Structure formats: C-alpha cells, structure tokens
C-alpha cells in the first residue's frame, strides 16, 4: 500500500484538481490523462494501461471514485465508498512474484481491463491504510489555491500539504502574516 499511495494521489490530482500548487490547472481527460498517468507507472504497467480502449475515461471514473473516498467527511461514509470501489473493481488478493523479489500480495481487480485491475489495487490500498493507520490519513492540501489530495503515511499523521512545493508556500505565507500582525 505504500507503493500505491503516491500513485493514488497523483491520479486524483491529475484528473480532478482545478487548483494545484497555487496555480489554476485544467483537469486532464481522455488520451492526455491516460498518457500522463501511464508515464508515472513502471514500463510494463504503463504500456498495458495505454493499450486499454477508453483508458482516459476509465481512469477519470476511477479518479472521481477515489476522490470521494479520500475526502469523505465521516468514517462510515469513507468505508462505504471504499467498500463500493472494492466491489466495483472486483479486487482479489493473490500472491505474485515479481522478478528478483519475494512473493508479495497483490489485489488486482478482476474487471476487464488494466485500469480495472489498478482500481482493485487502489481501492484495497485505501482499505489497508484505514485499517492500519485509521480514517484520518487522507486530505486535501491546506495551502492557498490548491485542491490536490494527499495520503499521509507519516508516523504521527502530521501531513497537511500535497507536497514540498505547497509546504514551502504555506510556510512563506505564515511568515508574512506574522510579520504583518
Ligand atoms: Zn498543495
């Protein structure tokens, strides 16, 4: 699940954020979304995702579902969203051996494309994070003009921003407002 967390946030941000790191951005759709997100995946997975017909539309649907789950206000709603995604994508645990690595657990979805397979992985990763860390590990960046989401796997759950750029922007803004007051 630590492997999946940054990819989950990346997909949601590429496909849904209208503000990111202080700038107005256009959520990606279609071919552009598929190509940009696939570039973040390993070679094998990247080609498989790009080969899926309507990959962009399928990724956009997955991103919308993930965003709802990540930003649900009540733990019960969050759990219901995640459970619905596990069913929707037909996630199934199985052990797989990648080259040079010991057997480890995958949760590929059993749907008809590589995007549905990813959906199963992502939905299960969210469930494992809630189970292992609690329900408060997802959020929307608190920096000015940023709608990006983050997944917080820090030990103490202290994360508030989508990345280093927004952490730096927020620090600068706080410093300025202290000097003015
Ligand atoms: Zn941000």
Image (cartoon, helix red, strand yellow):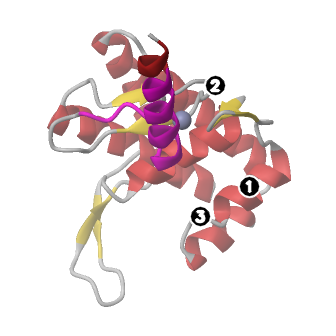
Q: Quadrant of residue 16?
A: top right
x and y percent of residue 17 in the render?
66, 32
Q: Is residue 121 visible?
A: no
Task: Assess disc 1: are there few (<14), some (14-19) or many (≥20) residues with their C-alpha within 10 Å of its C-alpha.
Answer: many
Q: Is residue 65 visible?
A: yes
As measured in the structure, the alpha-carbon distance from the residue carrying label 2 to the one carrying label 1 is 25 Å
Q: Which residue is mark 2?
A: 145
The rendered magenta stretch, by its main secondary structure, is classed as helix
Q: Which residue is mark 1?
A: 34
What number is the disc on residue 173? none
Q: Is mark 1 within 8 Å of ligand 1?
A: no
As measured in the structure, the alpha-carbon distance from the residue carrying label 1 to the one carrying label 3 is 10 Å
Label 1, secondary structure: give it.
helix
Membership of 54 in magenta stretch:
no
Q: Which residue is mark 3?
A: 40
Label 3, secondary structure: give it.
loop
x and y percent of residue 22 in the render?
65, 33
Task: Assess disc 3: are there few (<14), some (14-19) or many (≥20) residues with their C-alpha within 10 Å of its C-alpha.
Answer: some
Residue name at image x 26 percent, y 44 percent: 153
């Amino acid at each position: 699940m630590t492997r999946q967390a940054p990819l989950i946030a990346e997909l949601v941000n590429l496909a849904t954020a209208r503000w990111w790191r202080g700038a107005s951005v256009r959520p990606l759709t279609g071919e552009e979304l598929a190509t940009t997100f696939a570039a973040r995946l390993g070679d094998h997975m990247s080609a498989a995702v790009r080969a899926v017909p309507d990959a962009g539309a399928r990724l956009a649907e997955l991103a919308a579902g993930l965003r709802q789950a990540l930003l649900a206000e009540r733990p019960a709603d969050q759990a219901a969203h995640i459970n619905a995604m596990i069913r929707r994508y037909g996630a199934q645990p199985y052990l797989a051996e990648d080259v040079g690595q010991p057997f480890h657990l995958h949760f590929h979805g059993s749907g008809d494309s590589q995007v549905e397979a990813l959906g199963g992985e992502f939905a299960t990763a969210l469930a494992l994070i809630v189970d292992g860390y609690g329900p408060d590990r997802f959020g929307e960046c608190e920096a000015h003009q940023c709608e990006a989401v983050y997944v917080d796997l820090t030990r103490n759950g202290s994360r508030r921003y989508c990345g280093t750029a927004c952490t730096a922007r927020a620090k600068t803004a706080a410093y300025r407002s202290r000097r003015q007051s």
